Image (cartoon, helix red, strand yellow):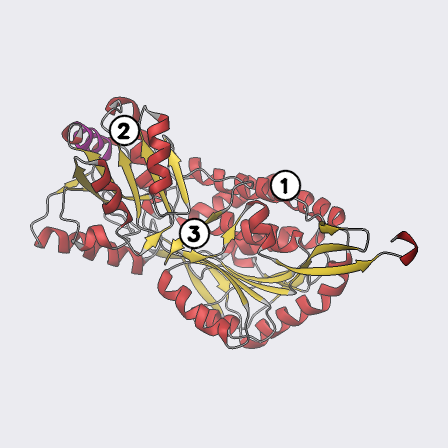
Amino acid sequence: MTQQITMTINGQAAITSDTMDVINPATAESFAQAPRASEADLNAAVDAAKAAYPAWKVLSHTQRAELMVKAGDAILANADELTELFTAEQGRPLKIAKDEILGAGMWFKGMARFELPVEVVEETKYRTVEVHREPLGVVCAIVPWNFPVLLASWKMSHALLAGNTMVVKPSPYTPLATLRIGEILRDILPPGVLNIISGGDELGPLMTTHPGFAKISFTGSTATGKRIMASAAQDLKRITLELGGNDACIVMPDVDVDEVAQQVFMGAFFNTAQVCIATKRLYIHDSIYDAMRDKLHGLAKTLKVGNGADSDNLFGPLQNKPQYERVKALMAEARERGLTLLEGGAVPDKGYFLPLTLVDNPADSERVVVEEAFGPILPLLRYSDLDEVIARANDSEYGLAGAVWSKDIEKAVEVAKRLETGTVWINQNLQTTPNTPIGGHKHSGIGVENGRDGLMEFTQPKSIFIPKPKSAV
């Protein structure tokens, strides 16, 4: 089945002359071929989206919302097939991979509840002033490999509901499940409304510089986001950039270590720590530091890491070889610098596996603290003063998300308000909903996704001044 998955252009299967290997990260071996789009394929996809735009734009919001619900239902109906495909290419264990597929289907259905009402900003005896929200045109969406299906659904559900048409490019490391969704939705969406193409690293720059796009929605590294921003400037494309993070979690001294340790652990290591909004710096109050460190290390040693196809495993491999080598080198450098690394249990020799690893109280200046590892290595950092730890948490070029753990909710809220991030969780982690905007401060991005604010990112305002009849004055 994986050999036959095709790109979707103008509502039809698009066969390419070239293909690329898709690697199962649990085995480090190719298990399928994916289409490799050419520049001509990209042009065809943009042309199809342009041709479909006028008719899609004039559909009522209710009509588009109904199609979003049908799209979500279709994804849910194919969840088992998509989950197996997802685990094979992404690596995440089956028992938690399915949540992403189900989440993607529910995102389409959840976003369909949002409306873009006409806002009356002035009503006098002389005139009415209305602000309408209109779609932008053809949208380019570039999706990363860590949450390839869910993040694609965020972009697709927003852009399409707002009346745009689009071309989506999944990561070359994880193209198959998204391409398969394109196949599933061919019978639901009008031809050309949603085009999904796959390709190597050369395809992204062709998309971001393409004059046919009105907007780029990108999730990925800050370095790539900066290059996209420069490309977009050439013809003033709109952009939404959800970029890197070095998210801080502050554990207050009043917590019950035994009660919260596993939740704190999962907030850092879920998806083998390949989560933009995961905890990447864990600040623990000095009075409970040793107890929390030992509890977290115990979890690292007992929770199973292995092939995602094995239902016993909770954590899978790093998703791709470059990321595996990068995190492996970061761990090696930390050891060479004399830092104390507390490793978890054994991991398979084959595949892109690394042990779940804690770093015991490194200096704030160490690379493992300053940089976003995006892999299973977590620095544990002591603190004793609340003002000091908030300053340390904020001392980063990133500001995507953060967390606070405390029995004193009121105090935790005050801490949350002082953190320079787009999202803060209190006594929880990694929670997102279709209703809640998510976006970064500082170098963590521009714009937001999700919620009404995220929907508005795919529109532009039009103010209409309507005079009233003189007889009414």
Tell me where residue 99 appears, x and y as whole percent: 48, 38
* Residue situated in front as seen by the camera: 217 or 78: 217
Q: Secondary structure at mark 2?
A: helix
Asked if one can make out residue 99 in the rendered structure from this viewpoint, the answer is yes
In the rendered image, the vertical position of residue 340 relative to residue 214, given as above or below: above
Select label 3 or label 2 by which is in front. Answer: 2
Q: Amino acid at mark 2?
A: Ala
Disc number placed over residue 109 in the picture, else none: 1
Foreground tag (3 vs 1): 1
Which mark, residue 89?
3
- Mark 1 or mark 3, which is nearer the start of the sequence? 3
Label 3 to label 1, Cα distance in Å? 26 Å
Residue 380 percent coordinates (x, y):
19, 40
Q: Are marks 1 and 2 in contact (CB under 8 Å)?
A: no
- At label 3, the amino acid type is Glu
Q: Which residue is mark 2?
A: 261
Q: Is residue 279 left or right of residue 346?
A: right
CA neighbours of label 3 inside 10 A, class few (<14), some (14 to 19), many (20+): many
**294 or 408: which is nearer to us?**
408
Pick the residue in front: 287 or 178: 287
Kindly indicate the quadrant of the structure image that contains residue 378: top left
The residue stretch that appears in magenta? 291-300
Mark 1–mark 2 distance (CA, rounded to whole Å): 34 Å
Q: Position of residue 337 (x, y in %)?
A: 8, 54
Q: Which residue is at a point 31% across and 40% down the rendered structure image?
A: 268
Q: Please give left or right for residue 267 compared with residue 365 in the image.
A: right
The secondary structure that dominates the magenta segment is helix
Q: Count residues near mark 2 (Cα–Cα under 10 Å), then give few for <14, some for 14-19, many for 20+.
A: some
Q: Amino acid at mark 1?
A: Lys
